[in-house]
Amino acid sequence: MNTKIKINFLLLLLFSFNGLFALDIDKEAQAYVKGEYNRGSYSNGEIQLIGNIGLNQLLDFGTGFSYLQNTESAEINIFFKAGVSPFSNQYASPLNFSVSYIFNGIVEYDINTHSILPLISYKTDRFGASIGPSFRFTSFFGETPQFESILSFYVYGNFIKTDSLLIGAGCGTFDEFNARNMAALWLDLHADIRLNDYFTFMNQIVWMQSGLDGLTTTFYGISYRGGIKFSW
């Protein structure tokens, strides 16, 4: 008799805990193919795989892997990201605090870069901005890593935002797989077409430049990234 009471009590606690802390989970899987021309390695081809998960619109986690092949060497890129949106107020809810770890490895030249990127972001459907310091450690041919601290930022605005179409532009110094130098400003134009409740066709064109000395800029390259996002 006592055993039955204990089991029933444990089951009651379990269902109460599950109801109190029920999770609303948002999941995304993304796959991209990217082509790029730049003045450093001329032609690049890249495959990117990205996964994201959100919990109760409070916590979000992401990870990704990319393999890049150019005329000189292969490159492997990996990132991990964790973020929190602690506010539920209408105006404060877009505020997000996150930290990312980014690894960039150039195989042929044994160059490895490790970046820690804490960010403060404010993101809405129409506009948004992110800013934070990038702590970068770069090692050449197995030597002692060289440390750099670089201000990173990204801003965007969406001109068209409907249930089936998103068109906008952004400018900044980092993305999922790269935390670049302050002078490496990249401008992107993006157009996302929602096919149905689950699939979205993603498009992005990026104009890359380098150098800000004397208020001059130098064209560095251009790229196109296209892929599919699956949300459920």
Image: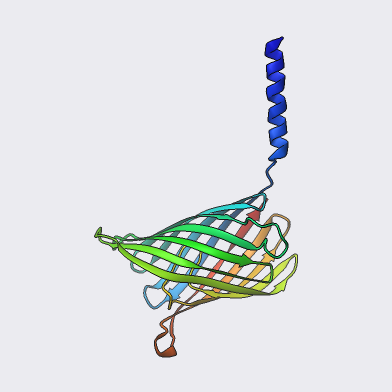
- State the residue in front, 135 or 70: 135
Display coloring: rainbow
Residue 1's place in the image compared with 37, above or below, is above
Q: Which of the 4 image quarters holds residue 228?
A: bottom right
Q: Pick the quarter of the image with the N terminus.
A: top right
Q: Residue furthest top?
A: 1
Image coordinates for residue 50, horizontal then vertical, percent: 54, 56
Residue 23's place in the image compared with 102, above or below, is above
Image coordinates for residue 67, horizontal then vertical, percent: 43, 59
- State the residue in front, 176 or 213: 213
In the image, what residue occupies the spot 69% across and 35% down? 18
Give the tally of numbered discs: 0
In the image, what residue occupies the spot 56% across and 55% down? 83
In the image, what residue occupies the spot 72% across and 26% down? 12
Image coordinates for residue 109, horizontal then vertical, percent: 29, 63
- State the residue in front, 12 or 224: 12
Residue 161's place in the image compared with 227, above or below, is below
| Left/right of residue 183 with respect to residue 129 in the rendered view | left
